Image (cartoon, rainbow, N blue to C red):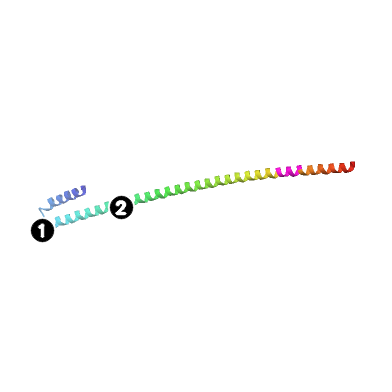
Amino acid sequence: MKLQQVITAVFAAVVVLAIPACSKDDVDKTKSSMSEAAESVKEKAGEAADATGDMARDASDATGDAMDDAGDAMSDAGDAMSDKWDDARDSMDDMADDAGDSADDMADDMEDAAEDAENEMEDAADEAEDELDEMNK
């Protein structure tokens, strides 16, 4: 709006100064030229404002897209970290289970070995007793 007021003031000044020296036809041509110039300035200002608005919207959209991408990347990183943590915990659980199974197997093997040793000692004692009996006869 201020641009139109400035143009109107300039036009009025030109008209006031030019009227005494110009014919009516010259005044009409000058008015027409001034109107066209004012309209042209108005159109260019409107186009510039539209372009500025478009650039601002594009910048806003690009910023929003970048923020969305950053949020997605952070979410993906969090998911990956959570997955790795779950995998590590599962591995630790598996290792603990395997260690427990190994300890159970070792205990069973030791028990079997103790029973075998006991049986062999009993067999050896029986043989020794039999031999003593044979020698005493």
Identify the residue at image location x=79%, y=44%. Answer: 123
Mark 2 closeness class: few <14, some 14–19, many ≥20 residues within 10 Å: few
Q: Amino acid at mark 1?
A: Asp
Is 22 in the magenta?
Answer: no
Q: Going 29% across and 51% down the picture, which residue do you hit?
A: 53
Dominant secondary-structure state across the stretch colored magenta: helix
For disc 1, the neighbor class at 10 Å (few under 14, some 14 to 19, many from 20) is few
Query: In the visual, does 58 lie left or right of 1?
Result: right
The residue that appears at 86% across and 43% down in the rendered structure is 131
Classify mark 2: helix, strand or loop. helix
x and y percentages locating residue 66 in the rendered image = 40, 50
Q: Position of residue 33 (x, y in %)?
A: 17, 57
Query: Which residue position holds label 1?
Result: 25
Q: Which of the two labelled residues, at mark 1 and mark 2, occupies the earlier sequence position?
A: 1
Q: Position of residue 2 (x, y in %)?
A: 21, 47
Q: Which residue is mark 2?
A: 54
Residue situated furthest front in the rendering:
137
User: Which residues, given as a range, are shown in magenta?
Assistant: 111-118
Residue at 74%, 44% (x, y): give it: 116
Marks 1/2: CA distance?
43 Å
Q: Nearer the viewer, residue 43 or 101?
A: 101
Looking at the image, which is closer to me, 74 or 7? 74
Q: Which SS class for mark 1?
A: helix
The spot of residue 68 in percent (x, y) is 40, 49
Q: Amino acid at mark 2?
A: Asp
Front residue of 76/13: it is: 76
Quarter occupied by residue 118: top right
For the residues bearing labels 1 and 2, Cβ distance under 8 angstroms: no
- For residue 91, side relative to residue 35 (left or right): right
In the picture, residue 119 is in which quadrant? top right
